[in-house]
Each structure stands twice: as structure tokens, then as C-alpha cells.
Image (cartoon, rainbow, N blue to C red):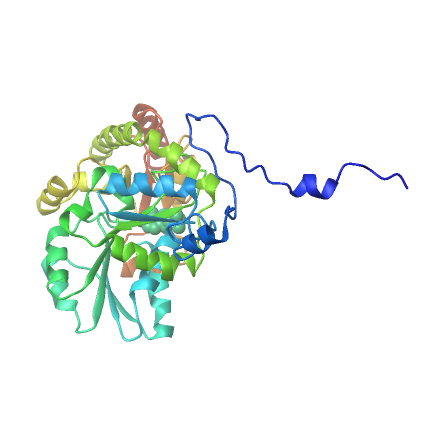
Amino acid sequence: MHKYVRDFETICSEVDKEYANYIPMAPDIVQTSSFYYPSYEEFMEDSKDEKSNFVYTRGANPTTKLLEDKLAALCGGECCRVFGSGMGAISATLFSLLSSGDHVLMVNTIYGESVQFVKDLSRFGVAMDRIDVETTDDIEDYLQENTKIIYFESPSSQKFELLDLEKIASIARSRGIYTVLDGTWASPLFQDPLAFHIDLVIHSLSKYVGGHSDIVAGAVIGSKELVDLISIRGHHALGSVNAPFNSWLALRGIRTLPVRMQQFDQSVQRVIQYLMEDPRVHRIYHPMTASSEQKQLAQKYLSGYGSLLAISLTDPSFEKMVEFVNELKVFSIGVSWGGFESLVLPANKGTNQQQLIERGLSSTHIRMFIGLESPEILIQDLNQALTKVYGGI
Ligand SMILES: *Cc1c(COP(=O)(O)O)cnc(C)c1O
């Protein structure tokens, strides 16, 4: 057999250790699992802290680190850890802070999987209550000796109710309870929970930060002490790691986050103005249309409006509501939100009546996301679908 002089095995496995002599405008996607070390001593030094040093991408990766630093800066936090999904960040945070015998208080309507995760922790001796409160002060009535975490969203899922962040932080701090806020609705730009002494803020980067409906990722931001604990117990060990390419896409999303948020803020106000005047729409759930107490909270805590809202229809028919969403041409039916495209998602699955009643949602409750299309086109689309199913006004 012919023998090649070239050593294929060596060429294929060789590593180019020369550093490139260019400075790219966009950050590198450091698509690597592990990192080389010139000496044993340097390797031993870095491997003492794999969450901070570039040893292995499950611990730290330069592209993800750039994203973490940017998110920490945006949220005014000391430290950020990025995960492979919003749920990765939520589950790792709760897992890291809780022990057997602890109690978690979950306030108002919360993302379904987050509630399910805490319910499942009962297998490890963690108790939970999911409560609805009229005002933030009512939370005190539900606290227990062993309450370790108050977990909430503000504005909440489905009903978009606000809580008084400063008050929750002060109630919790006086009793040594952690406060964890899923702040996805407002993005890092429109609400500043850490400034009001909330301990940890979580964002699903799959929404506004990614912004293009092409990634699933999440982040937790807070003090170095807490984020380090979460990194060790909940990131390095549980392994919900973000792929470097997805961190790069999130970084690219951040470049346009301010202009996109500004557009969402303007568009949602225009669409809500229309919805408020349409008698076929029964109720609008959004801070802009809430009670005066809620508006005061919005005034204090929000610096802009997120474009996720919900409506219920005047005609209670489930079948007609299904017809209505099917008649929409510009709005699509789909989960998630925060991308470029407008979406509707009925809460009524036809089989979850009990759940709807428990959450105080009507049979025609529809979650809506206002995307980057022209608000006038979106209004036309809503109007034509409403007219087709419920008649003109
Ligand atoms: C989407 C979402 C999550 C979950 O995030 P994933 O990235 O889908 O895991 C959590 N909380 C809120 C408020 C969300 O909208």
C-alpha cells in the first residue's frame, strides 16, 4: 500500500496556538469546550476556580463572559451568570438557595414552569405557597418562620400586576428572606429591581434580549456572593450552560435593545388606545390600563412599557374566540414573545377550565405580544378579525 509522507493524524489533531493578529468589530464566538495551558502551574492555578477562569466552557467561556458583563452592567448588578434557558436560570437559582425544611412564597401569577419546579421541590422537603395579593402589604400574612425566598414577577404573567419592590425588599430583609424577581417583562432597560434592594433579578434572554426569536437562554444578576453560590451549585453542577453561539446572538440582540424597547413602548400604547375604544374587547391587562394604585407603582418602577399584554373579549364564547385568533393575519399563534413578530396565545386550551378559574382568567383570555410591525397594521388586523367574528361596531 502507498505510504503517505504527511502525518494525517498529527495534522488533524494539531492546535494553532498562535494568537490571531486582528481585532474584530464583532466579538469572537469562542466555540470551544476546553482551553489549553502553557504550563502545569498555570493550569493548576486557574482550575482552582473554574467558574471564573477559562478552563472548561461549563465553568466559563469568553463569549458568554462578555454577555454576563454586559447584563450585569445593564442591570446595575455586581455579577451575572448566563444559563441555557430562562428556566435554567430560575431552577438553578432556587436549587442553590433552598434546603430541606425551607418554605418558598410565590406571589401572584407566575410563569407556569417556575411554579411547577418549586412544587416538585416538595420531594426534597421544600414547602411552597402560591398566593394572590391585592396589595404588597398582604404578603406579610403569608410569611412563615421558615420562609427562605419570596419569588415573584412584576408585572406578573397573564394579568401584568405590579408589586411594590421596595416594600417587598424591606419586608424580606428584616427577616433574612431572599427576594427573587423574574423581571423578563420589563427587560433590563425598563425596570431596575436591584436599585430597590431586590436580591436577585432573573431574565429569560429568549425574549427581549435575544429579540429575534432564535435563541433560548437566561440569566441571573445580583451580588457576587449570591451569584457565585448559584454558579457553583446551580450552573457548574447542574450544567444548564449557554452555547457560545447563543451568547453571541444575545450580545448581538443587546446592540439594538434600546431602539427595539423604545419601539415596543410606543407601539403597545398605540394598540392599547385602540383596544380601549373597541366594545368587542371586554378587558385589557397591562399596567397602562390598570387601577390608580397600580399606575402609581408603574410610575415609580417602570421607565417604559413592555409590549406583552392580555385581553378578554366581551362575547364569552370559547368557539368564537378560537375563530377570532384564526382570522388574524398579521398576528401569529405561538408561544414565547419578545421577538420581532406579533403573537397571540389564548390561555384557554379547552381542557384547563379549573386552572383558568384558579387563576381568575376568563374563557376568552388571550395573551398578546405587540411586535415590531407598524401598530397601524396591527390595529387593522385586530379590527378585521373582530369584525369577521363578532360583527362591526
Ligand atoms: C419565557 C419566560 C420564562 C422562561 O424562559 P425560557 O428561556 O423559555 O426558559 C420565565 N419567565 C418568564 C416571565 C418568561 O416569559
**Where does the C terminus fall, quadrant-wise?**
top left
Q: Does residue 317 appear in the picture of this structure?
A: no
Question: Does residue 39 appear left or right of residue 79 in this picture?
Answer: right
Would residue 130 appear left or right of 251 to someone viewing this image?
left
Image coordinates for residue 158, horizontal then vertical, percent: 28, 49
Q: Give me the residue at 9% from left, 47% from top.
A: 293
Q: Position of residue 188 (x, y in %)?
A: 26, 40
In front here: 148 or 112? 148
Residue nearest the observer in this picture, 115 or 367: 115
Residue 322 visible somewhere in the drawing: yes
Q: Nearer the viewer, residue 25 or 278?
A: 25
Q: Is residue 353 left or right of residue 300?
A: right
Residue 222 on image: x %, y %: 25, 51
Instruction: Count the marks.
Output: 0
At a point 32% along the width and 44% down the height, the residue shown is: 367
Q: Position of residue 338 (x, y in %)?
A: 35, 38
- The vertical placement of 240 against 386, above or below, is below
Which residue is depicted at the point 48% across and 27% down? 21
User: Split into 4 quadrants, where in the image is the N terminus?
Assistant: top right
Q: Residue at x 21, y 49 (%)?
A: 154
